[in-house]
Amino acid sequence: MGKGVRVSERFAEGDLVGVLTTEPLGRPLDYKAPAGGCTAGDLVEVPLGPRRVLGCVWGKGEGNFDIHRVRPVTRVLDAAPLRDEMRTFLQRAADYTLTPLPQMLRLATRAPDLGAGPATRRVLRATGREPARETEARLRVMDALDTFGGAWVTAGELAAEAGVSTAVIKGLVKAGVLAEEDAPRDLPYPRLNPNLPSKDLSDGQAEAAAALAAAVATGDYGTTLLKGVTGSGKTEVYLEAVAECLRQGRQALVLLPEIALTAGFLDRVEARFGAKPAEWHSGVTSTERRRLWRMIGVGEAQLVVGARSALFLPFRELGLIVVDEEHDTSYKQEEGVLYNARDMAVLRASICGAQVVLASATPALETWVNADSGKYRRLDLTARFGAAELPEMRAIDMRAEKLASNRWISETLARQVEARIAAGEQALLFLNRRGYAPVTICRACGHQVGCTECDARMVEHRFLKRLVCHQCGATRPVPEACPACSVEGKMAAVGPGVERLAEEVAERFPGARVSVLSSDLFGTARALKEAIETIAAGGADIIIGTQIVAKGHNFPLLTLVGVIDADLGLQGSDLRAAERTFQLMRQVAGRAGRADKPGVALLQTHQPEHPVIRAILTGNEEDFWRAEAAERRMAGAPPYGRMAGIVLSHPDVAVVFDFAGELARRDGPLRAIGAQIYGPAPAPIARVRGRHRVRLLVKAERGTPFQAALAEWAGQLKLPANLRLAIDIDPQSFL
């Protein structure tokens, strides 16, 4: 167990204990231990005013006020306690991210009915009988039942998934199509067998797998960058590390950046270990979330596959954390607790003596630097698995192409697409813009339609027949008349989105089967999964997609990737613009030629001589990372310096600017560590959901007591009513 971990304390009835609640009170409160006593880490129910709230026994009480006024703990919950390493992790994560500790505890106890004991519940299962009368609602219920993969499900959960009333469910029970029965509320997960045979690995894969397994077998902390080109079999390699972890009797966690990837990954796990692992993400029912939370704490779930919040589950004996596609920006939580799951995975593993595997074809610069400096070990997979070869990369110089003003597919790219369709293969056209058009403008007066609650343009989504704000989600019909000058018939869509590209594809390739993959076009993860499976089975000739297509999907027939606007990510002053463009282009290009047919990736660009575009085309990744690292070092930017973004917001622009200005003037604690403060200035998106936003940026050298100085600085002033202040350590977004 890692250094600094507290030893669990046992408290007898009546002893004074400090209980941290999930309420925003900032510190543990004193209570008396209940009858039978309690232990540090126990989850308890305590009285707080007229309410009873969830809390965790954090240690001894302070005893700094009248002992006779201290109330007793109501009861100890029938749930696994938060172990010493878990409480240490929450404390250190809170200190690093400058998050109040109660908020961290809330993140670690996000499961329903934790206070309920091991009772039974009424669940449903299919009997195998077909309904005598097949209605659309009944068929939706049967389809929904399939998505749960045989897991027990309540009537409410099934009705919600199918989008029907519970009356439909009751009718199917009465007809004998579904059976109701009592089942234990929480059951252990099926055991995984790590000794089942693995897939045949290449020599390079086997060597990397053996190295990871050996690291896991030590039982010590360590972090490894598993860098492999797209299609090199990174998953099969790190599954062997999972196997060794299970042989050691420890638990493993695999983080994935996208729910849509989960289904295919679960099948691969089942093929390797004979059973499916536990899942933790927003698509899991509340019943399953409670079950997993409770089972992980008693060691009855060996492997969890989940989203970033799975890091805060109460593992009993965590031995391995895999962060797949570790460069992905979705690992950064941008609301509530602001944390990066990659960094928190390393922190948690260092506390509990676990191994971390950071897997990516295009690692984050921070990870590359840590591996280059020797802080992390690095393993490379340089070849694709089997007969697959890396795609050929070429640029299409758009300055030499003749295109109509309302067209975005060059003739060069169009000819390549036609050749793929004729050969029975698939082509992917990539454009990282959702919707139909990014701007709707009045040709009479020049007015651009914006959101009424945000300083952002509204994006036309023609499939929805609405304008949508991508900041706050507000929607409105596409106006017939200009909101500014009232002239009708002059509203025009400017610029391309994937929906507009689909319109052009339908005209340019009239016989082709087209599938559009964009996150806003699928209401559920199940619908997205089905679309991906249909494409993989050959159900489309042309795929049009946003960045969702870059996240690990395998389309065997895909041999051509066309990037419509390779220059898009190079615009603006984002610190990570070059890095993200490089990662995204390489990941998207990697979708091509993953089976036995060679692939080609064509990048439409107006800047073929740009250093980032040249690095993408040549594949000189190490040269790119070295150059990018040198620029960051010169600028004192992460990972060579410390940075924090501060965002203040308030409905009144004067209030937020006055407060930000006063805060900037009181910069003594920051100057004391040599830090610099920039701002205040309006945020790039200066108003969101009716709140005016002001940004400040703080930079400091590495090795300084950065968080302590920030906390002292921000704590000098009392926040005005309704003013919000958020401190983002190591910001990923500067909007």
Image (cartoon, helix red, strand yellow):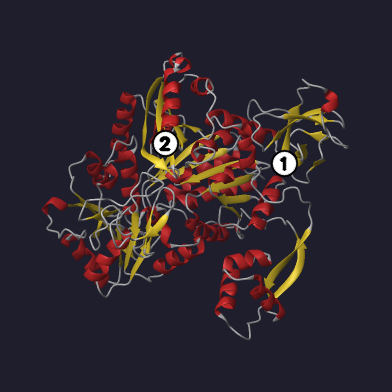
Residues at discs 1 and 2 in contact (Cβ within 8 Å):
no
Q: Secondary structure at mark 1?
A: strand
Q: How many marks?
A: 2
Q: Is residue 133 above or below residue 624?
A: below
Please tell me in which quadrant of the rendered image residue 359 appears. Answer: top left
Q: Position of residue 179 (x, y in %)?
A: 72, 74
Q: Nearer the viewer, residue 570 or 711?
A: 711
Q: Secondary structure at mark 2?
A: strand
Determine the CA span between mark 1 and mark 2. Answer: 34 Å
Q: Nearer the viewer, residue 236 or 9?
A: 9
* Residue depicted at 82% across the width and 22% down the height: 66
**Residue at image mark 1:** 54
The amino acid at mark 1 is Leu
Q: Nearer the viewer, mark 1 or mark 2?
A: 2
Q: Position of residue 611 (x, y in %)?
A: 22, 39
Q: Position of residue 239 (x, y in %)?
A: 53, 50
Residue 268: numbered disc: none
Q: Position of residue 479 (x, y in %)?
A: 32, 60
**Residue at image mark 2:** 693
Disc 1 crowd rating (10 Å Cα; few below 14, some 14-19, many 20+) is many
The amino acid at mark 2 is Arg
Q: Residue furthest front?
A: 486
